[in-house]
Image (tube, rainbow, N blue to C red):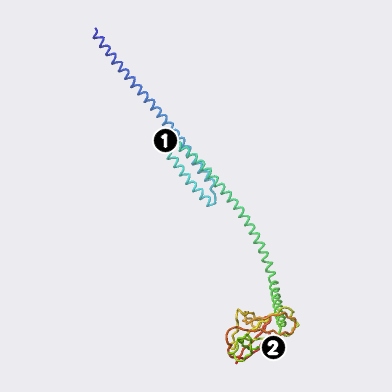
């Protein structure tokens, strides 16, 4: 009797263990089922979100293409910009599509989709602005064309008037040139008439002694300077005032004796139309009188050469007088 009770207790204990094990297994199975259900629900939710994003992506993309195509016109530059924008939109679309296909990047995909929307708005604004600028430029071009046409008409009218006046201008120009030539001739005549003539020019060859005094010499080897005196004449046409007399000393070989440090230079000869080198210049306040002017020419060039020398005096660009002397 006691043995039967013991067997029953063991059976009950085993049964209890089995029941507990079965309950644990059921609990585990139930937990797994619930977890799998949540995973499935999450996957369903992600798939639904992916589908939603995919649909929204395609909608925005095709709407953007349609808007850009509507803005296409005859301007090749704007059309090129639109084509480039379409390429960039496709690149953005493909990037978002890859994120959606990844399955676990819905947040990034949504953010990029919003960026796509902003990108399209910027593109539309850019094209709109460029079209407005082109329209403004077109208006300015039309205005310039109208102005050019008006100017061309005015130019044609002015050209006709100029052609009518051309003949008169040629005649006036010819007459004006004649008057100018006549005035020039008269001016030359007056200038020539006002030249103060130099009737006499005296040259004294000199030698400076050690004492500083000079003595008259006639041999070239003993001469180291010249005393040149010339006398002005009366000229009632010449106006009183400062007059310049340019003296030119020519050597026996025809060269002008000139030393920069002694005031030599060049003048324009109205007689020959060429520049003339002169030896020195003297000036004084002319009052229509006769006056003797003297100058010591000491070129410090050593002894003079033998031969016949010529002295010329110029006034107002004309030869006013000349003389010759010989050194033996």
Q: Position of residue 58 (x, y in %)?
A: 47, 39
Local secondary structure at mark 1: loop
Assess disc 1: are there few (<14), some (14-19) or many (≥20) residues with their C-alpha within 10 Å of its C-alpha.
Answer: few
Furthest residue toward right: 236
Q: Position of residue 169 (x, y in %)?
A: 69, 71
The residue wearing badge 2 is 200
Does any portion of residue 58 appear in the rendered image?
no
Q: Quadrant of residue 278?
A: bottom right
Local secondary structure at mark 2: strand
User: Sequence-wise, which precedes: disc 2 or disc 1?
Assistant: 1
Name the quarter where the N terminus is drawn. Answer: top left
Instruction: Identify which residue is drawn at 60% across, 81% down.
Output: 259
| 115 horizontally vs 266: left or right | left
Towards the viewer: 328 or 207: 207
Tag of residue 104 = 1
Instruction: Find the distance from the CA under tag 2 to the CA under tag 1.
Output: 125 Å
Instruction: Identify which residue is drawn at 53% across, 52% down.
Output: 77
Towards the viewer: 85 or 184: 184
Residue 11, compared with residue 251, is above or below; it is: above
Q: Quadrant of residue 253?
A: bottom right
Residue 105, compared with residue 180, is above or below; it is: above
Q: Quadrant of residue 283?
A: bottom right
Q: Position of residue 214 (x, y in %)?
A: 63, 87
Does any portion of residue 35 appear in the rendered image?
yes
| 243 horizontally vs 302: left or right | right
Q: Position of residue 39 (x, y in %)?
A: 40, 29
Name the quarter where the C terminus is drawn. Answer: bottom right
Residue 1, compared with residue 263, is above or below; it is: above
Towards the viewer: 135 or 202: 202
């Amino acid at each position: 009797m006691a043995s039967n009770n013991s067997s029953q207790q063991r059976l009950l204990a085993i049964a209890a263990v089995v029941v507990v094990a079965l309950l644990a297994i059921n609990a585990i199975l139930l937990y797994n089922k619930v977890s799998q259900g949540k995973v499935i629900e999450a996957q369903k939710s992600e798939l639904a979100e992916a589908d939603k994003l995919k649909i929204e992506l395609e909608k925005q993309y095709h709407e953007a293409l349609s808007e850009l195509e509507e803005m296409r016109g005859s301007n090749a530059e704007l059309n090129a910009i639109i084509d480039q924008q379409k390429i960039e939109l496709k690149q953005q679309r493909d990037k978002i599509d890859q994120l959606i296909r990844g399955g676990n990047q819905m947040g990034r995909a949504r953010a990029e989709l919003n960026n796509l929307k902003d990108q399209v708005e910027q593109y539309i604004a850019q094209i709109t602005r460029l079209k407005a600028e082109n329209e403004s430029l077109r208006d300015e071009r039309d205005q310039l064309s109208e102005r050019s046409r008006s100017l061309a008409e005015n130019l044609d009218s002015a050209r006709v008037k100029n052609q009518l006046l051309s003949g008169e201008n040629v005649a006036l120009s010819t007459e004006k040139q004649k008057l100018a030539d006549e005035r020039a001739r008269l001016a030359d005549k007056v200038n020539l008439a006002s030249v103060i003539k130099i009737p006499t020019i005296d040259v004294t060859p000199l030698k400076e002694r050690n004492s500083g005094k000079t003595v008259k010499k006639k041999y070239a080897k003993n001469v180291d300077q010249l005393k040149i005196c010339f006398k002005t004449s009366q000229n009632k046409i010449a106006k009183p005032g400062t007059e310049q007399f340019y003296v030119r000393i020519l050597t026996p070989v025809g060269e002008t004796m000139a030393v920069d440090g002694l005031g030599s230079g060049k003048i324009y000869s109205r007689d020959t139309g060429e520049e003339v080198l002169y030896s020195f210049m003297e000036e004084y306040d002319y009052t229509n009188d006769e006056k003797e002017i003297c100058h010591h020419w000491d070129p410090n060039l050593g002894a003079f050469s033998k031969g016949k020398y010529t002295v010329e005096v110029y006034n107002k660009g004309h030869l006013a007088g000349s003389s010759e002397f010989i050194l033996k």
